[in-house]
Image (cartoon, helix red, strand yellow):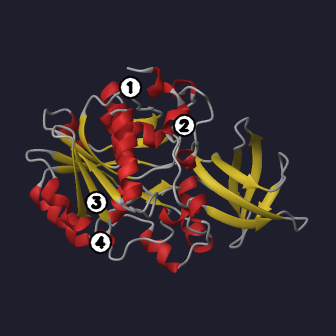
Amino acid sequence: MSNKELLTSSYDFTLPSELIATHPASPRDSAKLLVYNRKTDQITHAIFSDFENFIPKDCALIFNDTKVIKARLFGHKPSGGKIELLINKALNAYDVNVYIRGKVKVGTEILFDEDLVATLKELNEDGSRVVNFSACGAQLRFEDILPIIDKIGHVPLPPYIQREDNIEDKSEYQSVFAKAEGAVAAPTASLHFTPEQHKRVCDKFPHAYVTLHVGSGTFKPIETDTITDHPMHSEYYDISPHAKELLDSNIPILSVGTTSTRTVEFYVRNPHATKGEANLFLHPNNKPLRVNHLLTNFHLPKSTLLMLVASFVGLENAQKLYAEAIKEKYRFYSYGDAMLII
């Protein structure tokens, strides 16, 4: 492998701003689909509604059933100063890792609607914070705050969308099979499925669900010169018994999204752990061991997600595929178009 594949700068590219998708395709399966066949080195341009026609025979699909929570909260300090808080993930029953816009000291209370209060407990070196939530003086477990933030919170759209969330985003920034609450970013390859298409695919192919609660670290660009020096973020995962059964078999796997891929590949490297924290970084020097095919979107420059794509196809092919997508005016990022690697 060349040194180029380990240089962060190799994963940079210029994207015309008009190709950043700020709204979802409507209907969902009208998005474009770029299909890349590694055996023939052939690129096919299609529409996502044709996705099942390209799925290799005799393979199983793995979906991520995580559900995006309304993780963006607007509150204020007792003094009146405005604060924006973004929930990142639960650390345990009571401690929650968050990002806060605004100056706050340890011990500060942040007040929200519905009598919700966040008390700052720790400051972390990476810029995140640890808070505990309470209401009416009683400390709340993480699962207890979910119905409250569903009332008062906002959909945590990625920063590059550059607009406020709206009523459409509540349903559109969520897969049709989302179930397990906890993500602060959507597993975006899943967003292309309509209920009808999801049913068609599941009727035709063996399939199973894993859960990986996507954290805000998924958007963080790599800041080290060499990709292997990057400290990979961790996210909570859970492998269902049916998914474990499929993963322990010899059936080829098509992973729907980078999040499903990371979950499967972390499990394969840690076969006795069906739940916990996954921090696997896939790149050309750490290729997939179990996932054979990948459905994904088009990702940010210098992101771990782009490097995951390169772990399947190599750096040069990843660059070629992205150049082709830009030339053909594919829409990029969370609400953008899709790519299938077979």
How far apart in space, not on screen, are marks 4 and 3 (Cα)? 9 Å
Which amino acid, mark 2? His
Which amino acid, mark 1? Asn
Q: Image quarter for residue 233?
A: top right
Q: Residue at x 48, y 63 (%)?
A: 19
Q: Residues within 10 Å of mark 2 (few under 14, many from 20)?
A: some
Front residue of 97/299: it is: 299
Q: Earlier in the sequence, mark 4 or mark 2?
A: 4
- Kindly identify which residue carries mark 1: 286
Front residue of 64/135: it is: 64
Residue 116's spot in the image, x, y percent? 70, 65
Q: Residues within 10 Å of mark 3 (few under 14, many from 20)?
A: many
- Kindly identify which residue carries mark 2: 233
User: Label 4's element?
Assistant: helix
User: Label 2's element?
Assistant: loop
- Kindly identify which residue carries mark 4: 30
User: Label 1's element?
Assistant: loop
Residue 52's spot in the image, x, y percent? 16, 59
How far apart in space, not on screen, are marks 1 and 2 (Cα)? 16 Å
Which amino acid, mark 4? Ser
Which amino acid, mark 3? Leu
How far apart in space, not on screen, are marks 3 and 2 (Cα)? 29 Å
Q: Residue at x 33, y 57 (%)?
A: 338
Kindly identify which numbered label has been placed on residue 33: 3
How far apart in space, not on screen, are marks 3 and 1 (Cα)? 26 Å
Q: Earlier in the sequence, mark 3 or mark 1?
A: 3
Q: Residues within 10 Å of mark 1 (few under 14, many from 20)?
A: some
> Closer to the observer: label 3 or label 2?
3
Q: Is residue 271 visible?
A: no
Residue 100's spot in the image, x, y percent? 73, 53
